[in-house]
Amino acid sequence: MSYPPDLIKRLQTHAYTIRRHSLIMTTRAASGHPSSSLSMAEIMAALYFHELRVDPRCPDWPERDRFVLSKGHGCPAQFAALAERGFFDRRELLTLRQLGSFLQGHPDLKTPGVEAATGSLGNGISIAVGMALAGKLDRRPWRVYTVIGDGECQEGMVWEAAMAAAHFRLDNLCALLDFNGLETDGPVREIMNPEPLDDKFRAFGWHVVEVDGHDLVQILDALAEARRTAGRPTMIIAHTVKGKGVSFMEHELDWHGKPASPEQLRQALAELDAWAAAAGLEPPPPLDGEA
Amino acid sequence: MDGPRLLLAKTESPPRAVATRDAYGDALAQLGAEDPDIVVLDADLAKSTKTIKFAERFPERFFEVGIAEQNLMGIAAGLALAGKKPFVSTFAVFGTGRAFEPLRNSIAYPALNVKICLSHAGVTVGEDGGSHQTVEDIALMRSLPNLTVVVPADAVETAQAVRAIHAHHGPVYLRMGRPSVPVIFDAEGYRFRLGRATVLREGRDVALMACGIMVSQALAAAERLAAEGIEALVLNVSTVKPLDEETVCAAAARTGAVVTCEEHSVIGGLGSAVAEVLGERRPTPMERVGIKDVFGESGTWKDLLKARGLTPDDIVSAARRVLRRKAD
Ligand SMILES: Cc1ncc(C[n+]2csc(CCOP(=O)(O)OP(=O)(O)O)c2C)c(N)n1
Ligand SMILES: [Mg+2]
C-alpha cells in the first residue's frame, strides 16, 4: 500500500526517538536491555503511532486495542513509546528501574498504558490469547497485539498459546516476532533452533507474513493484512537486527542485557543523530539529563 | 457448647457424604446464572473437577484449553485483564506445580481477579498414587503475596466459599478433594466468612486447629478425647491465608496447647502458618498432625489417611503428647 510520505517520516522519527530514549534510559539505570529495545523500535513506532486505537488520557478506555509485550525485557522501547504517545511525562523515563518508579525492570501494571505484567518469557502471548478471547466473547471490535522474541519461541508455553489462538479462531490477535537471531547465550539457531518459524506457526494454524522489521511500510502493510485476515490469528515475522542503529551493538551477542557506558552512549547517540540527519528526520525531543 | 452446635449438621447415620469438588461444580453453575462475567476454564479434566456442570449450562462461557496448564493460567490472566471473572480448574498438582510460574507472574504478582479452584489435592486422591497427590500445594500457594488460600472442610462450606471468593476481588486458591467426605455443616446454621476461623466446639484443655477433610477428623478426635475427660476446642481454619491470627491466638490462650491437623506436608502448610504466628505472638506447646515430609502412594483414600497418620487416633495421640508438654 502507499502511505503519505510524511506518515512514514513521522514514524521513522518516532523509531529514532524510541532508540535514543531506550539507550539513555538504560545507561541512566545502569542496567536493562538496550539492544533488545533497538531491534523493535520500528515495531513500537508502527503500533503506538499508527495501528493501536488507544487514548492516553483514558488508558482504561474499554474499547481500546491492547498491546502485550511478551518479550518483556524490551520494555524500554515500549516505555519510550508510551511516554511519546502521551501516557506519562517523558521525564519519568529517567526513573527506569529505580526504587519506587512506576517504570519497573519489566512491564508492570503500575505503568499507565501497560496492559499486563510480563518479563517471564512465554507468559505474554498466553495473556494476549486470553484478552483476545474476551474480545471475541463480548463481540467487541478491539484487537490485541503482542511482540515475542525468537529465543522466546523456545518456550513450550508459546506453542501452547499458539495452538489455542488458532483453535479459538482469534483473528483479533496479531503477534509480531522480533526475529533478530540472538538470545542471551548465543545465536538462536545454535542454542536451540526453533526454525523454520514461518512453517511452524503456519502449521499451528496462523496466517504468517514476513517483513523487514525496520521497514515501516512493510510493517504497516502487514498490520493491515492482519486486520483483513478472518478466522485465524496473524504472525508477522519481522526480520530485525539486534542493536539496530548503533554500530558497536548491531549483531553483537555481548550486548544482550548490557547498557552502554556514558562514553559509549555519547557515541551511540551521535551515530543515531547522524543517521537521522541524513534521513532528514526532525530532531527528537530531548530527555532531561541527557548525556 | 450450644452456639457452636448449631453450626454442625445433625449426625445422620451413615453421615451424608459429598465430594467438595461436586459442591464446587454445583455452586459454580448456580453462580454462572447470576453473573455473566464469570468464565470457566479447564485443562481436560472438566469431568473430574466438575466444571462440566458449568460447561453444560453455559457452553459459550466455558473454555477447554487442553492439557496445557501454563496456558490455562495465562489465558485466565488475559480474560481477567479484559474484565472477566475467570475460575480455572484442573488437578492441584498440575495447577500449583506445572503452572506455578505463570500463576505467580501473570496472576498473583499483578493481583488479578482469577479464582484458581483445584481439585484432587492431598493424598485422598488415592489410587492414582504419589505423582497425582499434592503434599506441597498449600505451601506453594501460601508463599505467594496477594494470594488468598481457602481449604473448605465439606460440601456445605465449599458452596459458601465459592460465593465468598467470587465476591472478593483478587486471586484465590481454593483447594478441593476427590472423595466423598462427610457433610459436617448445617447449611442454614453455618456461615463461611473469608479470612475467619470458626470455633466448632468449645474446650479448654487443647485446641485442635484443622482445615479441609481434617476438620471432621478433628471433630471425631474431640469426641474421643471427651470420653477421656479432655475438653478439646475445635477450630476450623478454612482460610489458611490470610490466617485469622486473632482467633488462633485466642484459642491458644484459652487452651495452652495446640494440635494442627492438615492433609498436607507439615512443612509449609497450616501447621507452619499457625506455628509462625504462635511463635511470635503467643508461644504455646504444639504438635502438627500432617504428612511427615514424604510423598503419597497408591491405595484407597481411607487407607492412605491411616498410612500417612491422618486419622482421629493420630490426632488423639498428638493431643496427649502436647498435653504432657503443657503440664511440664
Ligand atoms: C522464562 C524466562 N527464562 C529466561 C529469561 C531470561 N531472559 C531474558 S531475555 C532472554 C533472551 C531472550 O531472547 P529473545 O527472545 O530472542 O529476545 P531478544 O532480546 O533477542 O529480542 C532470556 C533468556 C526470562 N526472562 N524468562
Ligand atoms: Mg532474539
Image: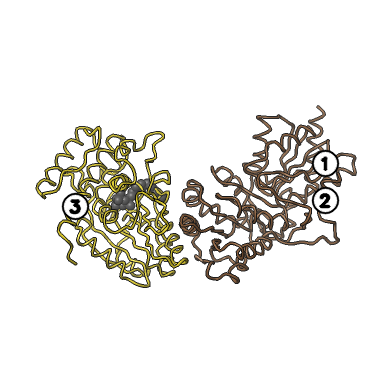
Chain colours: A yellow, B brown
Q: Amino acid at mark 1?
A: Glu
Which of A242/B75 is in front?
B75
Q: Chain of mark 2?
A: B
**Left or right: where B229 falls relative to A283:** right
Disc 2 versus disc 3: distance between alpha carbons?
73 Å
Q: Which residue is mark 2?
A: B6
Q: Amino acid at mark 3?
A: Gln
Element class at badge 2: helix
Instruction: Say which of B275 and A64 sits in front.
Output: A64
Q: Respond yes or no on whether mark 1 lies under 8 Å from ligand 1.
A: no
- Where residue A12 is drawn, which disc sits there? 3
| Neighbourhood count class around disc 1 (C-alpha, 10 Å): few under 14, some 14–19, many 20 upward | many
Q: Is residue B194 left or right of residue B38?
A: right
Is residue A59 or residue A17 the one in the foreground? Answer: A59
Q: Which residue is mark 1?
A: B202
Q: Amino acid at mark 2?
A: Leu
To the question of a shared chain for discs 2 and 1, the answer is: yes
Of circles 2 and 1, which is in front? 2
